[in-house]
Amino acid sequence: MGLARSPTSPSAGTMSWPMTHASGSLRKPIVLRCPIRPPVGAATREPLPGRAPPAAAGRRRRCLPRGARAGSPSRGGSFDEFLAAVRSETALRLEPLLLAAGAVLLRGFPARTAADFDRAVDAFGYEELPYVVAAPRTNVVGRVFTANESPPDQSIPFHHEMAQAPTFPSKLLFFCEVDAKSDGETPVVLSYYVYKKVNDMFPEFVEKLEKCGLIYTRVLGEGDDSSSPIGRGWQSVFATSDKVVAEERAAARGMELEWTGDRVKTVTGPIPAVKWDERRGRKIWFVNMVAAYTGWKDARNGPVNTVSFGDGSPLPGDIMDEYGKILEEECVAIPWQQGDILLIDNWAVLHGRRSSKSPRRILASLCK
């Protein structure tokens, strides 16, 4: 069982991923498909079903189709064959696609459980990166954790994973163990394109970001709070109940701590808001700015004050509003199906979470 590309069969298991052609202002999301079974014919590229041509496109919410093929996916090969294909073809096929697209979605392959996903993570061959920041997560098995455990009716704004930390993952792997009945998509957007659009619209704002960077501030409780998207307590974040040890571990991560009883305020930065992507040779918008500005709110934290310019001055609200609109206009939202594995290049793509009325269970693994 290989991962070679070929024309789509309505009943075949597929590997599909959002990609973009970037030429001037043209960004055309497309879907590439690959059946599990041996390839037949040449590779094909299909425009996203329902997408208007670029000149006529006026929609702000783009979505990969939920149920893009009729019937159930074929499980044409065994799980061991799938793992063997991942091991042998990640460098040859998946890495070039990831470099070009920023995100690769594997769909229709025979991964069904957290244990399956853990074995798949190992097969990709990427080194593990421990998770050290805000969201409450639970280790499920091996290298696999729950994704953000906040209630499903809460959306999560766009962010680069751990962008507010000195050390962050280069790749993210997500797995859908239980899909939502509706909604709950994961939207993704290309970071370099966001940088370009914001810089075109607000060059002085971007110049100050590049000069000053950002400071992130967050108040942690003692224990985890699963009702909050940033509810991880300081004992979990620093893996200790000893405040002295927490201070030492915070310093190693470039954080300053300010204690108030059992709560602690963490201050990180200034850290760069714009980075240089060596592999692609371009600037990227490497921030958790909108996530912190609009989404870091709970019983301990209020929005707006959680992120500022590196000189301490506040971010301009009108520009932040426009920035949020750019993210929504340029993103592609990926609806989950049980068994999906989504590989994201954290250098290239910001991701988020749409709210859903029904529970879903997405698992995650972070890679150096």
Image (spheres, rainbow, N blue to C red):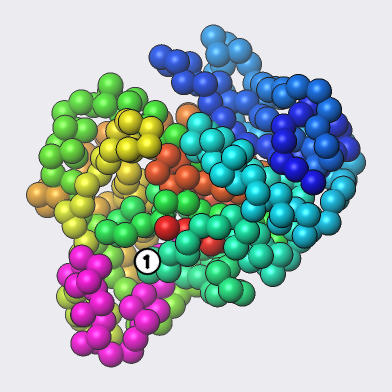
Question: Magenta segment range?
Answer: 229-256
Question: 236 above or below 322?
Answer: below
Is 309 located above or below residue 189 in the figure?
below
Give the residue at x 26% y 26%: 199
Q: Residues within 10 Å of mark 1 (few under 14, many from 20)?
A: many
Q: In front: 73, or 123?
A: 123
Q: Amino acid at mark 1?
A: Val
Residue 143 visible? The answer is yes
Q: Position of residue 69 (x, y in %)?
A: 82, 35
Q: Is residue 28 above or below residue 90?
A: above
235 magenta-colored:
yes
Q: Residue at x 45, y 15 (%)?
A: 23
Residue 221 or residue 196, whichever sits in front: 196
Quarter where residue 254 is shown: bottom left
Looking at the image, is 242 positioned above or below residue 182?
below
Q: Which residue is mark 1?
A: 133
Quadrant of residue 298 within the rendered picture: bottom left
Instruction: Tell me if residue 178 can be seen.
Output: no
* Residue 283 pos. (x, y %): 30, 33
Quadrant into which the C terminus falls:
bottom left
Identified at 21% across, 43% down, the residue is: 315
* 60 sits left or right of 231 in the view: right
Query: Does the segment drawn in magenta span residue 363?
Result: no
| Residue shown at the point (38%, 37%) measured from the top left | 279
Q: Which residue is at the front of the view, 105 or 119?
A: 119
